[in-house]
Image: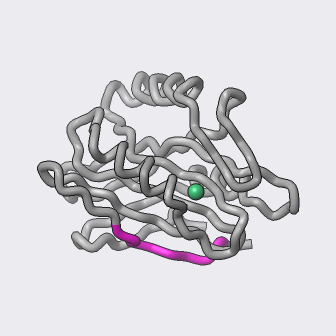
Amino acid sequence: MLDHQYQLPSNHFLKITLNSYQVMKSFIQLEKNSCEAGGILVGRVLDESNNFIIDDVSSPMPTDHRRRNHFYRHPNGHQDFFDKKWGESKNTCFYLGEWHTHPEPSPYPSHIDFQTWRRLLKFPTQNISVLFFIILGTSQMKIWQGTNNNGAIRIELVAASKIDA
Ligand SMILES: [Zn+2]
């Protein structure tokens, strides 16, 4: 199976490596009592094309707050994950956003999700103005793109795809 690739409104592409996809997919909430899961997206922005590649995603850490309808990602562990990838990439990878799961077939962001995303866009920690937010429902995965253009924050849905069995 190939990497997952999505065309963005800017006509650039977002690619998700198969490994990253499979890690996220392994947490979809198919059981009645499974809790939300999530982590960070780590990858590259290709200079020549301005395409984005999500190379790695972190998995839930013991200090994250996980409930049936709630996921709060604590920095613990995810920061170590990023630091490790940062070293492996010789300081060339980026934090590209967040992913989490929802216990519904087609996921819709909660009020808290939007608040969290807006906050992340408002206080960028690196020199890129785009972040991605992925939610995996039980049958659909959706991707939002968030941008901060000199303080003007915009979040738009850029892809929705069926999660393959
Ligand atoms: Zn959510």
- Determine if the magenta segment contains residue 159: yes
> Residue 95: horizontal and vertical position, in percent?
38, 39
Q: Quick check: 6 above or below 26? A: below
- Please tell me whether residue 144 belongs to the stretch shown in magenta: no
In the depicted structure, whether residue 125 falls above or below residue 24: above
The residue depicted at 86 percent of the width and 55 percent of the height is: 33
Q: Position of residue 110 (x, y in %)?
A: 54, 61
The percent position of residue 3, horizontal first and vertical second, equals: 51, 62
Which residue is at 39% across, 30% downward?
A: 89
**Dominant secondary-structure state across the stretch colored magenta:** strand
List the single residue furthest toward the left: 150
Task: Say which of 158 and 66 sits in front.
Answer: 66
Regarding ligand 1, which quadrant of the image does it lie in? bottom right
Instruction: Please provide the residue range marked out in magenta.
Output: 156-163
In the displayed structure, 70 sits above or below 25; it is above
Q: Is residue 155 left or right of residue 164?
A: left
- Taking depth in this image into account, of 89 and 67 the one nearest to the observer is 67
Query: At 50% across and 59% down in the image, what residue appears?
Result: 111
